[in-house]
Image (tube, rainbow, N blue to C red):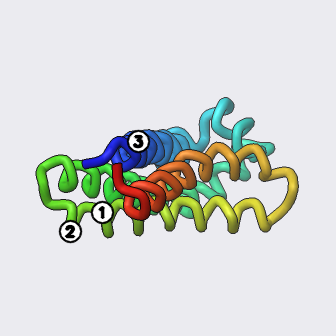
Amino acid sequence: MTALLVISSVFAVLAGLVHVYIFFLESIAWTSPRVRRIFSVETESDALATRSLAFNQGFYNLFLAIGAVLGVVLVAAGNGDVGWPITVFATASMLGAAVVLLGTGRRYLRAAVAQGSLPFLALLFALLGSTFGG
């Protein structure tokens, strides 16, 4: 594997870890005061009313994380023909979700950048690595 593809893999795993953290926030800690502040949920009753939606959304993030990490593990195990498509699909989905988040309003810029930067870098280095090789 080339240095550029190794860098891509590192960014994909880091993106996966960020999405595991988002899963934790949305699916496990949603009603805590700290998480309510992070997501601008004003009251505990609002958090309780949206808990099932956040729970579901958290699992989307977890599944994307699993895809990114599993893809990298498969690549590292020598099965790049399967691992790279999984990694690219998972990170492209993460980036797409960040773009959609950004499209919902400027107040989500920081969250969209946090959610989308690492997947963007993973995809960029995967493209460079597959195009230019070594």
Q: Nearer the viewer, residue 79 or 36?
A: 79
User: Where 89 falls versus 72 (above or below)?
Assistant: below
User: Quadrant of the rendered structure where residue 13 is?
Assistant: top left
Which numbered disc, 3 or 2, marks the residue that appears first in the sequence?
A: 3
Q: Are marks 1 and 2 in contact (CB under 8 Å)?
A: yes
Mark positioned earlier in the residue sequence (3 or 1) = 3
The residue that label 3 is drawn on is: 7
Q: Which residue is mark 1?
A: 84
- The residue singled out by tag 2 in the image is 81
Q: Position of residue 72 (x, y in %)?
A: 28, 51
- Report x, y in % for residue 7: 41, 41
Question: Which residue is painted at 32% across and 69% down in the image?
Answer: 85
Name above or below for residue 27 compared with residue 90.
above
In this rendering, is residue 35 above or below 62? above
Q: Is residue 93 above or below residue 78?
A: below
Residue type at the position of mark 2: Asp
Left or right? Give the position of 24 relative to 109.
left
In contact (CB < 8 Å): disc 3 and disc 2: no
Of residue 43 and residue 108, the one placed in the foreground of this image is: 108
